[in-house]
Amino acid sequence: MIRSFEDLVNSLHHSGKKKRVAVVCPADGHTEYVVKRSLQEGIAEFIFVNAGKCKSEFEELCNTYPNSIKIYETATPDEAAQKAVELVRNGDAEVLMKGTINTDNLLRAVLSKEHGLLESGRVLSHISVAQIPSYGKFLIFTDAAVIPAPTLEQFDSMLHYAIGVSRNMGVECPKVALLHCTEKVSGKFPHTLSYMELIKRAEEGLYGDVCMSGPMDVKTACDVESGKVKGISSPVVGDADILIFPNIESGNVFYKTITLFGKADIAGMLSGTTAPVVVASRADSNESKYYSLALACSYSK
């Protein structure tokens, strides 16, 4: 079972299989850090898809690792995004990563109906993996960046993606907490009605071997004493592997709070696409962006 980012990086290193990463417009210090560390630790090779003078920022790396970096030149960021997506679609790269290109420009290429990476009928979502010092294992949560107010079927997709990531980390029976501010189911909060349907689907085996419970708050999901005080009996209480947030506001606030006040290391990627897409926040640390790439490399086929 992979319980830390150190474990994750070590597993990638010892696998001996370097993933090919297409980086769109690599022209900033954060991207340089991620690329350099990945090359040093032997977990990835890179295809730089540049627009303008991006190449000059990475000349030293290109000279040091000539067999691990390939370069394509394009005229504009939009063309760079389209080329990188094409490389992933053709199997020349297994992971797509954002550099300095605007996220909207990159997603326009990713979501193109004819030439993008999101197949018809699939749901785009964001998966986060957190290593919190006070919690003894990874905590996976969704969605903090893409889906504003999930519908039942979007919740269903979010669950499939998060459970897949958890199993990829070696968790045989992921424990899933469906989050709310209380334990009450109410028509005033439609997502709690969706939760009841999701639990029914879980009991019918539609998500494989999982343990799912809710609604419950974050503290109950991650602190066993809170569950005892409230009289809630569930294997999920105090030991959650996965948190499903009811909306993007709560998920994003949680993301920023645990990194600032909880000193959490965190990784994230877009799921639902044919290959993982790393679109880190501008405020994320170098380490977070590196761990995001490691996560995507681990999850890619």
Image (cartoon, rainbow, N blue to C red):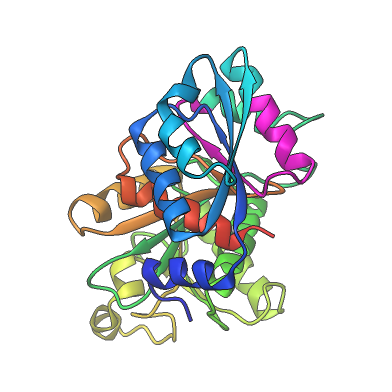
Q: Is 236 in front, or is 1? A: 1
**What's the magenta region?**
81-103
Q: Is 66 in front, or is 142? A: 66
Horizontal and vertical percent position of residue 7: 42, 73
Is residue 188 at all visible to an observer of this figure?
Answer: no
> In the visual, does 204 lie left or right of 38?
right
> In the visual, does 85 lie left or right of 14?
right
Horizontal and vertical percent position of residue 285: 30, 45
**Would you place residue 273 above or below residue 261 in this image?**
above
Horizontal and vertical percent position of residue 152: 63, 54
Q: Which residue is at 50% across, 36% downward?
A: 62
Q: Which residue is at 52% across, 40% downward?
A: 146
Q: Which residue is at 26% across, 56% downward?
A: 258
> In the visual, does 30 lie left or right of 42?
left
> Picture quarter containing residue 300?
bottom right
Q: Quadrant of the C terminus?
A: bottom right
